[in-house]
Amino acid sequence: MNSPIDWRAEAARLDFRNQAFIDGRFTPAISGKTFDTISPIDGRVLAHVAACDAADIDRAVAAARAAFEKGSWSEVAPRQRKRTLIKLADLIAKHANELALLETLDMGKPVRDARGDVAAVAECVRWYGEAIDKLYDEIAPTPRDALALITREPVGIVAAVVPWNYPLLMAAWKFAPALATGNSVVLKPAEQSPLSILRVAELAIEAGIPAGVFNVVPGFGETAGQALGRHMDVDAIAFTGSTSVGKLFLRYAGESNMKSVSLECGGKSPNIVFADAPDLDAAAEVAADGIFGNSGQVCDAGSRLLVEEKIHDAFLAKVSELSRKYKPRDPLDPDTIMGSMVDRTQMDRVLGYIETGKSEGAALKVGGKQARIETGGFYIEPTIFAGVDNQMKIAREEIFGPVLATIPFSTADEAIRIANDSIYGLEANIWTNDLTKAHKTARALRAGVVTINTRDAGGIVVPFGGYKQSGFGRDKSLHALEKYTQLKATYIKLG
Ligand code: NAD
């Protein structure tokens, strides 16, 4: 039997990559500037990381373009890209503990969750690698005197700008399909969580991805992120983050070169529990995990819990009881299921929403306070509000923390009306034993993902993305490839 890992001892041995990764090597920012990356576990500085700005972005985009034009990745046979990506997936799996530890230290998620995330990252890279030599192009049904080929070509330079809540997984959902289709990538991680992806960039070279094809430029949104959004030689932006920043990327594209933009943005997802749910205990477990997992820093968190009136009090009691399990603890303890918030700013923001909920007249049933203050880290208790009206700010705005808003309803039509009364449309969950009601409700919900009597089913094989201001374009599945390729129609006259 393997002896348990001493994560603190492992952490003390870690080496941090703290420079930009451009054209196959680590390099400081041209300005020489750095920023501190702080561990939310205890508030200590982990590393001083290169603070890239427009000059570094120019350098990274030029390297990406040169690699693309050279064709050593963009023009190799798909089966060759497949082999390399599978090798990268193997290397990610081989270094899983190190990568998980980097994520935990950098953003405070429990190490057991981080290990699960890294496994999903390896699976994602492997899946796109395996897919890419099994895709065929089309021939159009033209008259016999012509041949029309419809082919998909890589867009060229893909800039990926990603958030901190699943630092590697959100990155992999972009870079794996973008690389599989032959593009060069310039990726900007969130300033809160640059460490794990810098290590993966190094592994990409070890796997055989040519220099310049995969670049990572740490830095702030307003400098590095904006420079990518406005760059005249970036062909596509793949963004995951808040709706407000997503809107900026639309503006950047319109004011520069009309690069294509795909947006995976925020959510305020309704989790609808009917009285005839097949298993209310299972529904309660999922409701708790859906808002307290990853400290609620999840784009499709089930943050609005809609419960049918006749079971409302009993169901709320079950979820409240389960919330005790999520008491924040040391993220480096392998048994911990709820760690810290990503940073002080996010913690203060969430605590501010809790005050708003109280002043709006919602009933605070569980939690509501900062926790583990003595550690110097940024923790919040699992928090549940009852008696929430869907017009309250805590039901309308994305809190991105462990704060559940419970809203009663009496009919399916009312549940659908409340669920759809949101600017967001990322995900919705339904719990019922009635197949007709389940299907009618699913059809009526304006959300990119709907789950029935489960949550988060499907893994990499189903598309993920939102309706309305949750964005457009899809990550995961073969549909993600649409964002990184463009169609070419080639007509040939045959006599
Ligand atoms: P954010 O929008 O603040 O930042 C996301 C990225 O954009 C970061 O890399 C950041 O540096 C960059 N950025 C920030 N300001 C910028 C600017 N002015 N110009 C260019 N780039 C800029 O989001 P966040 O706080 O890192 O992440 C949380 C958000 O991400 C939530 O709204 C969450 O719902 C969303 N999210 C969505 C999905 C999804 O798949 N739909 C998945 C995860 C997270």
Image: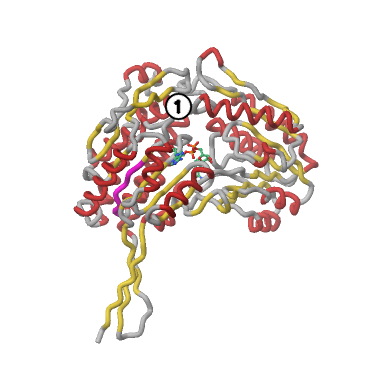
- Relative placement, left or right, of 191 versus 363 is left
Which residue is tagged 1? 111
Q: Identify the image quadrant of the C terminus.
A: bottom left
The residue nearer to you, when weighing 470 against 253, is 253
Tag 1, which secondary structure? Answer: helix
Q: Which residue is located at x 61 percent, y 38 percent?
A: 286
- Magenta segment boundaries in residue numbering: 182-187
Q: Position of residue 421 (x, y in %)?
A: 68, 49
Residue 296 appears in the rendering: yes
Is 47 rendered above or below residue 227? above
Q: Position of residue 373 (x, y in %)?
A: 56, 15
Classed neighbour count for the residue bearing mark 1: other residues with Cα under 10 Å, few (<14), some (14–19), many (≥20): many
The residue nearer to you, when weighing 131 against 200, is 200
- Relative placement, left or right, of 442 versus 311 is left
Q: For residue 312, what is the image quadrant?
A: top right
Q: For residue 362, what is the image quadrant?
A: top right
Q: Amino acid at mark 1?
A: Val
Q: Position of residue 454 (x, y in %)?
A: 60, 45
State the residue lying farthest toward the top.
374
Q: Is mark 1 within 8 Å of ligand 1?
A: no
Is 344 rendered above or below residue 182? above
Q: Identify the image quadrant of the N terminus.
A: top left
Q: Position of residue 367 (x, y in %)?
A: 66, 24
Q: Which residue is located at x 47 percent, y 31 percent?
A: 113
The residue nearer to you, when weighing 305 against 284, is 305
Residue 90 appears in the rendering: no
Q: Which residue is located at x 55 percent, y 43 percent?
A: 266
**Residue 183 is a magenta residue:** yes
Secondary structure mostly taken by the magenta-highlighted segment of the chain: strand
